[in-house]
Amino acid sequence: MQRAAAESEKTIAVLSETYLKSAYTQPEWAAAFANDPSALERKLIPVRVKSCKPEGMLRPLVYVDLVGVSQVEAKQRILEMVKERVKPDTEPAFPGGVESVEPLEQPNPVKFPPDKLNATSKVKDIKLRNLEKQMAALEEDYNASIDQLSFTDNAVSRKRLERQISTIEVEITEIAEKIDTLE
């Protein structure tokens, strides 16, 4: 079993309650998962053949679902999962462009009247600036993820990007609420 796991290019995890409860299957799929945890090479191919609920490390994985489908449909789904990622015929256009960089002008320092300058307003301003920087970085990550999603054909990678986009959306909402409370 050790040699087979080490030498195999791909490992198919045949998901069913029996498979999930077996003592010998976990080391097999875990070895494939450990060699490709981000599923870029698709070394682990989970295939659900009977109704079951994968738990633990198998839970977030996208699997080929064969429950309740015809033999022809099952074959098609498996072939889709194991085929290599299709690349576009032409290279996608670079989303940015070469821009000339102009030197930034240094802003004039703001002068506050002595009675308005206090530690509380300084802290509030610093927090607000930091939150706005975080928001800008999240928006940049969000846009990059959306662009990447449009060029991704791999189901596993698409699912990972969709989860990433969802997480970024939650973070953007949280930061927007924090900004609202400070303003």
Image (cartoon, rainbow, N blue to C red):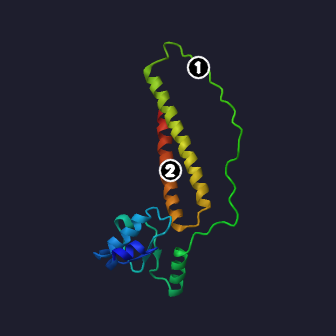
Q: Secondary structure at mark 1?
A: loop
Q: Which class describes the residues within 10 Å of circle 1: few (<14), some (14-19), or many (20+)? A: few
Question: Which secondary structure lies at badge 2?
Answer: helix
Residue 1 lies, with reference to residue 125, above or below; the image says below
Res 60 visible: no
Task: Say what amino acid the circle numbered 2 marks.
Answer: Ile
Residue 168: numbered disc: 2
Residue 126 point in image, percent of width and height: 48, 29
Cα–Cα span, label 1 and label 2? 34 Å
| Nearest to the observer: residue 167 or residue 181 | 167
Q: Is residue 167 visible?
A: yes
Residue at 39% in and 80% down: 50
| Residue extending farthest bottom | 71
Q: Which residue is mark 1?
A: 109
Q: Compared with residue 14, is residue 100 higher up or lower down, i.e. above or below? A: above
Side of 100 where 47 appears, left or right: left
Specify the label residue 91 is tagged with.
none
* CB within 8 Å, label 1 to label 2: no
User: Could you say where residue 30 lies in the image, as x and y percent from the top left?
Assistant: 36, 68
Residue at screen point 32% across, 79% down: 18
